[in-house]
């Protein structure tokens, strides 16, 4: 029993690290995999390097997407598509009146 109480802080530390660091990273990685697998033609996306474009086609052989940009068509790996930035790009724009009213309330 004495040995267990000596190792209890170390065990507790590993449990805390798991729940606050490892588990959230695994959850986010799973969400990104799902996002990459659910991409379809016509989706507007942003790559992690900041390239904006629209998905034109898929290359299943290379696990890549072909994106049409202002400069032409470029092939990117599916994992290079940014989930956060693409979702932010595709979310509906808020009306200006609501955003201005909210800004005024925050100042008060």
Image (tube, rainbow, N blue to C red):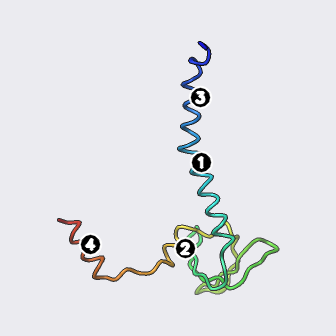
Label 1 Cα neighbours within 10 Å, binned few <14 / some 14-19 / many ≥20: few
Proximity of marks 3 and 1: CB atoms separated by less than 8 Å: no
* Disc with the residue nearer the chain's start (3 vs 4): 3
Proximity of marks 3 and 2: CB atoms separated by less than 8 Å: no
Q: How many marks?
A: 4
Expressed as whole percent of the image width and height from the top left, the position of residue 49 reads 58, 68
Quadrant containing the N terminus in the rendered view: top right
Expressed as whole percent of the image width and height from the top left, the position of residue 89 reads 50, 77
Instruction: Name the residue furthest right.
Output: 61
The circle on residue 11 is 3
Spatial CA distance of label 3 from label 4 is 46 Å
Looking at the image, which residue is at 54% across and 25% down?
A: 9
Query: Would you identify the image quadrant in which residue 53 lies?
Result: bottom right
Describe the element under mark 3 as helix, strand or loop: helix
Label 4 Cα neighbours within 10 Å, binned few <14 / some 14-19 / many ≥20: few
Spatial CA distance of label 4 from label 2 is 25 Å
Q: Which residue is mark 2?
A: 86
Q: Which residue is mark 1?
A: 23
Q: Which residue is mark 4?
A: 102
Mark in the foreground, 3 or 2: 3
The circle on residue 3 is none
* Disc with the residue nearer the chain's start (3 vs 2): 3
Spatial CA distance of label 4 from label 1 is 35 Å
Spatial CA distance of label 1 from label 2 is 24 Å
* Disc with the residue nearer the chain's start (4 vs 1): 1
């Amino acid at each position: 029993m004495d040995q267990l109480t000596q190792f209890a802080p170390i065990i507790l530390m590993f449990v805390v690290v798991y729940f606050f660091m490892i588990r959230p990273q695994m959850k986010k990685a799973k969400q990104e995999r799902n996002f990459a697998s659910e991409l379809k033609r016509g989706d507007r996306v942003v790559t992690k390097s900041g390239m904006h474009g629209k998905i034109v086609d898929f290359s299943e052989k290379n696990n890549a997407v072909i994106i049409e940009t202002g400069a032409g068509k470029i092939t990117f790996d599916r994992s290079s598509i940014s989930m956060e930035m693409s979702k932010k790009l595709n979310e509906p724009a808020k009306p200006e009146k609501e955003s201005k009213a909210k800004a005024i309330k925050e100042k008060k």
